[in-house]
Image (cartoon, rainbow, N blue to C red):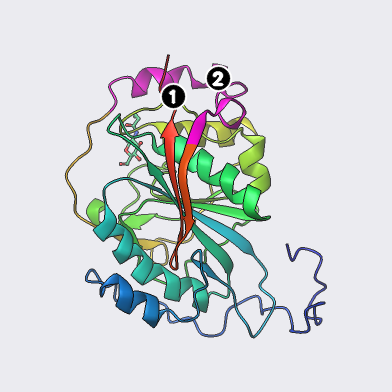
Amino acid sequence: SNSNANNNATSSSGVPRCPATPPNLVGPLAVSKTPPNLQAMEKAFARVKQGGRGAPDECQSRYRVAIVIPFRDRFKHLMTLLYNLHPILLRQQIDYQIFVVEQDGTWQFNRAMLMNIGYVEALKERTFDCFIFHDVDLLPENDKNIYNCPQQPRHMSVAVDKFSYKLPYSDLFGGVSAMTTQHFRLVNGFSNVFWGWGGEDDDMANRIKSKGLHISRYPANVARYKMLIHKKEKANPKRYEFLKSGKKRFQTDGLNNLQYEVLDHKHLKLYTWYLVRLTPPN
Ligand code: BGN
C-alpha cells in the first residue's frame, strides 16, 4: 500500500505520488453498450496487465483497490462493463485489479457470499486498501465518480437510469459500493444467509450503522449509472425476516463463517476469475 508515501514527495519507486485530483478526467461520459469482441478488447487495452490490473506509470497511485464483481451467466454484460470501466480506472490513476467471482451450479444466487469470497481471495494475492463491490449490469456515466474508498463507506450508484436517476431510499447500499479493507473486516463482511434476490445490501447498511459508521455519497450528477436490461431475478421470500433478525447474527454470520470451495482460478487478460462452489444452507 502507498499509505506511508509522504506528501508530494517522490516515492521509493522513483516516480512522484499522483496528484489528489487526477488531471485527465472527462466528466460526463457516453457509455457504450456494444463492446468489440474479446480479442479486439484485449488489444485495445494495452495498458491493462494480466489479471485485469492497471496502475499509472507516471506516478505512484494513492489507492490500491480491488473491484469485486459477483457473477453468473451474464458474459455479455461483463464484457460491456469491462469495456467501459477499464478506461475510467486508468484515467483515475487507481492501482486496481478486477476480480470476477462466479457462482457454480444452478442453486439460487448468493451475491453477498460471492463478494465475501472476492474479499478473502483478493487479499490472499496481495494487499488492498479498498474494496468496491460492483454489480455486472451497472455502467458508470461519469469518471469524476472516483473508484476509491473515503473515510466512510460509500454508496456509488446513487442515480441509476432504471430508477429515473433518483436514489430509491436513503439507506440503499446496493449496486456499486465501496468500503475500506478495515471497515469490511470490522463489520464481518456481508451476511451469508441471503439466497436469491434482495436484502443483503440492506443488511450491510445495518452492519455499517451498528459500528457507528455511515453511508456517504457523491452528488447524484456525478454518481450516475446506466443499467443493462435483464430479466428480473426471483426475490427471496425470506429477505424481510432475515433483515429483521440480522443484528443477532452480525458477529457470527459473515467473513468468519464463510464456506466455499474454489473450483477454478485464472488470471485472464481483462480480469481475475474465480469459479466457486458455495456451501448451501443446512
Ligand atoms: C430493495 C431491496 C434491495 C435492493 C433495492 C434496489 C429488499 C429487502 C426488503 C426491504 N431490499 O427493496 O436489496 O438493492 O431494493 O433494487 O428487498
**Which residue in the structure is indicated by mark 2?**
249
Q: Is residue 214 above or below residue 80?
A: above
Q: Is residue 146 above or below residue 242?
A: below
* Residue in the picture at 54% in, 62% down: 97
Provide the residue span drawn in magenta.
Answer: 236-261
- Measuring from the top left, give residue 56's x and y in whole percent: 60, 79
Image quadrant for the C terminus?
A: top left
Image quadrant for the N terminus?
A: bottom right
* Residue in the picture at 51% in, 85% down: 24
Out of 50 and 3, give the one closest to the viewer: 50
The image quadrant that residue 232 belongs to is: top left
Q: Can I make out residue 227 in this image?
A: no
Q: Is residue 138 above or below residue 193?
A: below
Tell which circle, 2 or 1, labels the residue nearer the N-terminal end: 1
- Please report contact status of discs 2 and 1: CB closer than 8 Å, yes or no: yes
- Measuring from the top left, give residue 256's x and y in whole percent: 62, 28
Residue furthest to the top: 282
Out of 9 and 98, give the one closest to the viewer: 98
Q: Which mark is residue 193?
A: 1
- Measuring from the top left, give residue 263's x and y in whole percent: 45, 40
